[in-house]
Amino acid sequence: MEKEHDMKVFRLGATCDLGDVEEGKTYIGRVQGFANFGTFVQLNDRIKGLVHKSNVKTDHKERESILVKVLTIRGNGNIDLEEATIPVYTVEMVEKKSTAVRLSELGTKVGRTVRIEGEIAQIKQTSGPTIFTLVDESGTENAAAFVEAGVRAYPEAELGDLVRIVGEVMLRNNQLQIEVSSLSLLTGDEAEAVRERIELALDQRAEPPEIPLLVPSEVMEKLRPGMRNIAKIIRKAVFTSQPILLRHHADADGICSAVAIEQAVTALIRESGGDFDGEYYLFKRAPSKAPFYEIEDITRDLDFALKDHARFGQKLPLVLLTDNGSTEEDLPSLKMAQVYGIPIVVVDHHHPDEIVDQYLAGHVNPYHVGGDFGITAGMLGTEIARLINPSVENLIRHLPAVAGVGDRSEAPERAQFLDLVKATYSEDHCKDIALALDYQQFWLRFNDGRELTKDVLDLTGNPDRHQRLVALLVEGANAAIADQMSASMPHVRHQTLPNGAELFLLDVEIHAHKFTFPPPGKTSGEVHDRLCKQHAGSPVVTIGFGPDFAVLRSRGVLMNIPKMVRELRDEIPGGGISGGGHLVVGSIKFVEGMREEVLEGLIKKISRDAVGP
């Protein structure tokens, strides 16, 4: 005889019929109504039986749960029941025997009842039903379960659980949806088998296609395994409904890299049947003012991600960093992300610090294979976007050329990417697009300007509007630059260093317009360009500085700015020094009271560096 705690009762699934009911077994039912001769009990929406008044043991109200033992199943289909009182028991679901279908097959099953096995990727409680987003080896779809308006259905089911769902396939607003009749958790070996099946299929499905690079490049060919790895991580995130957050440096190169990936990912979300809407709730792009992942950025991102996790049942995101993420300055943010188990991948061309790799799931950087910053983030991001979703290639193939001229690349790949699109986008037009991006982003501040940016980059299928918008933005940018240069150039100080380099200094805090375009970094770059033309053939270094920062631009001096920053940090106690960037283009921060000491130390280090052509 079974002990009380070993007693098992059964719950009939919604699709079960009389053939699934067995005499002698105890089931969970619901009181349907009362008569003089007994109590009617529903075992599911299809099946009901009668507890004769002689077999009723306790008082009940309509719709209350009740345990009943099946005494007899009569030939006419009537079921005789007896109320059971069992203090402690376990529940086992009874499902109608059927073959589970894949989510990708639901389009052919509209109006039919199906059984699905998959993982819960999101749980969203609406004012009506509970929406479960399911993932299996073939796709992603939503299942709606209703108890009462605004009441959580199946509260035992949690994010990441493997479940078996039975329900009818419906079309709601032209989107497939399963109307849930029953949901049961999979456990033990059964759950493990389903998980392994899904993981194996997803791993194969996420594998990027084998396609050649847009242009021949020895450096990018060596980076191909790393780019494939990041593309696979992103594809898998899409297929499992994991949100993706893309952070990028807020300049033309960073924007091109990010937008190329944005186009690939959002198209893949639509193609894979995910719950995609105009708010991009599975994909967000956000600019970072600095060329690294600042604490301000990660704090804001974590705040939004944790709120979405709590309110909408979303997974925590995959974070993708482009044109940032490779340096020691990123470490505090990378460590904070690690606390929450948030994976991070990096596509960057700043001089990398090896210490960051322990916090990253993937890292593509040309310096890892003997390249340098001439292979820009926009070039790398576009190639990764093609691996994520080759269907967007024709839309984004001009973005590496824009990124190359925008970041002043001198790598041979710049000319190759320009040649690739010269029939539609001349070099001058690419430069105009890059300047328009910088000018627009300055006014956007921390907003992504998604639709405006697509017009600037000619991604909306409206070339006339693209041409007029770029021309207008370039006109505004050039007017602002000319105004800034007329104010700043007369105040540039000059000295010739012992190594023969021509050094120019400008206090952009007191000799440049504030809070307008161009900002201090670009102002220093524009000054540097003009000085290089005036001193053609000579090595030139320009330092634009303010109370607590300095921006460096160099031509013909073999500097290593990240190394300089580290040395100055050790040599000047109390300087509060940080910074970095590329080898010959970068920035440094310090405390205001130590400005003279830091600038003096910086100039000494520039003086010792070798000069070249």
Image (cartoon, helix red, strand yellow):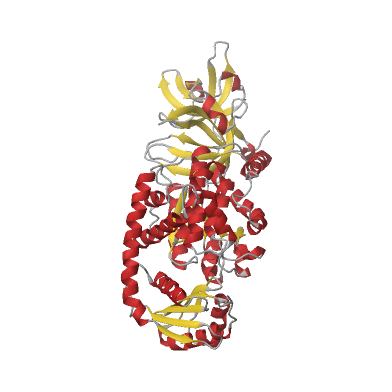
**Residue 472 at x, y percent in the picture:** 32, 55
Q: Quadrant of residue 149?
A: top left
| Image-based side of 408 in relation to 198, left or right | left
Quadrant containing the C terminus in the rendered view: bottom right
Count how many numbered circles sit on residues in the image: 0
Q: Could you tell me if residue 356 is visible in this image?
A: yes
**Residue 120 at x, y percent in the picture:** 54, 42
| Image-based side of 336 in relation to 127, left or right | right
Q: Quadrant of residue 596?
A: bottom left
Q: Could you tell me if residue 446 is visible in this image?
A: no
Quadrant containing the N terminus in the rendered view: top right
- Compared to 79, does 337 lie above or below? below
At horizontal 36% and vertical 68% (from top left) the residue drawn is: 518
At horizontal 39% and vertical 45% (from top left) the residue drawn is: 463
Q: Nearer the viewer, residue 549 or 503?
A: 503
Q: Quadrant of residue 79?
A: top right
Q: Nearer the viewer, residue 343 or 90?
A: 343
At horizontal 46% and vertical 22% (from top left) the residue drawn is: 40
Farthest residue in the top direction? 76
Q: Nearer the viewer, residue 372 or 161?
A: 372
**Residue 293 at x, y percent in the picture:** 49, 65
**Residue 371 at x, y percent in the picture:** 63, 64
- Compared to 504, does 471 lie above or below? above
- Compared to 472, does 556 lie above or below? below
Q: Nearer the viewer, residue 312 or 157?
A: 312
